[in-house]
Image (cartoon, rainbow, N blue to C red):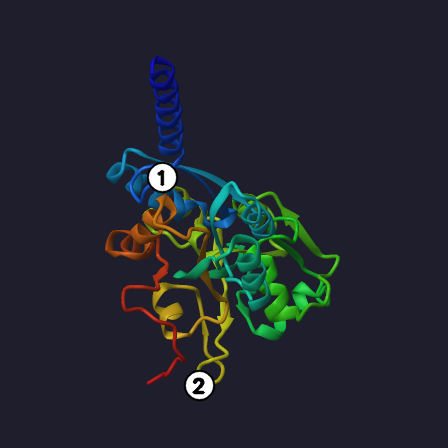
């Protein structure tokens, strides 16, 4: 009898320890610890999202890594990364592969819309660009230095290659900068160059650093390919993106790997609802879940 009681006690202690360990490893929509990876050019507004989320949920610990888009997808393939925020979703093949691997397909969708700004030195007179012009610059057919963020691995680089070069190679005049701020610094010091950066790095009127940067650089006007009226050019802005007047606009996607409500779902819900969407709006992006949508431009 004493032996039976002793064995039962040992089993109960082992079960309690296991339960305690499992509880420590679990997370909920409002607490726990997870890892996410984010396209590096999104850092300014994602930092704001995290700051407000952390104030609301102090028990939540989101460990974030800012990387090129291709590295984000590599992280997502690893067990440790719960969510990535990039410029594209998953194609059908990727969805099927993840479903076979995980037993369920990750969820993904659009949180907001950003744009690629074409930036030039303040002293440069050439500030109006057709899509054909930009294709020539990127393809090395024009004697002009082109600089962009990352080693041809970011979402911006992929978007430009897909939409303007159609998978052909960049010209030898295209150089890589170590991050968006370095692109801006390069343009400040070179009058015969154009740069490509996320609008969120140059379009925030509340950011003192961006306001200061715009004393030395300016955003170019880009041809609107969706407008009924031909010859219409515009700069990236919330209004032009939402109306479809700016051709180099691109989505901000989340891809979430959770089959039960966890901290990833909690952070996603925060970014999708009013406070999170207002942070995107405050960052001069176009929220995707607050009644804003992209549509063809109809000029009156």
Q: Position of residue 207 (x, y in %)?
A: 36, 45
User: Looking at the picture, does residue 220 appear above or below residue 229?
Assistant: above
How crowded is the residue under tag 2: few (<14 C-alpha within 10 Å), some, or many (20+)?
few
Q: Quadrant of the N terminus?
A: top left
Pointer 1: residues within 10 angstroms few (<14), some, or many (20+)?
A: many
Q: Is residue 285 above or below residue 206?
A: below
Disc 1, SS = loop
Q: Residue at x 47, y 80 (%)?
A: 226
In the picture as drawn, the residue positioned furthest to the right comes out as 172
Between 197 and 259, the residue placed more toward the observer is 259
State which mark lies toward you, 2 or 1: 1
**Is 208 in front, or is 57?**
57
Q: Earlier in the sequence, mark 2 or mark 1?
A: 1
Residue under the point 49% across and 71% down:
247
* Numbered label attached to residue 229: 2
Q: Is residue 282 visible?
A: no
Residue located farthest toward the front when viewing the structure as drawn = 1
Query: In this image, 231 relative to 33: left or right?
Result: right
Please provide percent x and percent y for residue 68: 57, 48
Q: Quarter holding the C terminus? A: bottom left
Element under label 2? loop
The image quadrant of residue 12 is top left
Task: Farthest residue to the top: give it.
Answer: 2
Of residue 31 and residue 200, the one placed in the foreground of this image is 31
Q: Residue at x 35, y 64 (%)?
A: 288
Q: Which residue is mark 1?
A: 27
Q: Position of residue 290 (x, y in %)?
A: 27, 64
Query: Marks 2 and 1, how far apart in space?
Result: 53 Å
Q: Please tell me which residue lies in front, 206 or 143.
A: 206
């Amino acid at each position: 009898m004493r032996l039976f009681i002793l064995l039962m006690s040992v089993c109960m202690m082992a079960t309690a320890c296991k339960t305690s360990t499992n509880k420590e490893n679990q997370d909920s929509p409002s607490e726990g610890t997870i890892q996410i990876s984010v396209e590096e050019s999104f850092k300014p507004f994602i930092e704001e999202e995290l700051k407000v989320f952390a104030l609301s949920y102090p028990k939540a610990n989101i460990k974030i890594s800012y990387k090129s888009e291709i590295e984000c997808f590599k992280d997502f393939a690893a067990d440790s990364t719960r969510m990535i925020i990039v410029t594209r979703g998953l194609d059908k093949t990727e969805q099927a592969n993840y479903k076979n691997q995980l037993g369920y397909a990750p969820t993904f969708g659009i949180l907001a819309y950003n744009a690629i700004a074409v930036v030039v030195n303040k002293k440069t007179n050439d500030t109006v660009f057709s899509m054909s012009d930009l294709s020539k610059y990127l393809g090395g057919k024009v004697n002009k230095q082109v600089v962009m963020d990352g080693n041809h691995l970011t979402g911006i680089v992929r978007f430009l290659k897909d939409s303007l070069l159609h998978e052909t190679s960049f010209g030898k005049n295209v150089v890589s900068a170590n991050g968006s701020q370095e692109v801006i610094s390069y343009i400040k010091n070179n009058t015969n160059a154009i740069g490509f950066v996320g609008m969120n790095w140059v379009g925030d009127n509340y950011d003192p650093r961006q306001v200061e940067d715009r004393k030395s650089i300016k955003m170019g006007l880009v041809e609107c390919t969706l407008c009924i009226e031909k010859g219409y050019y515009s700069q990236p802005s919330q209004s032009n993106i939402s109306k479809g007047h700016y051709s180099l606009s691109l989505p901000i996607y989340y891809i979430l790997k959770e089959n039960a409500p966890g901290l990833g779902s909690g952070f996603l819900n925060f970014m999708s609802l009013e406070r999170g969407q207002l942070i995107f709006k405050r960052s001069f992006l176009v929220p995707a879940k607050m009644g804003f949508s992209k549509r063809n431009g109809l000029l009156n």
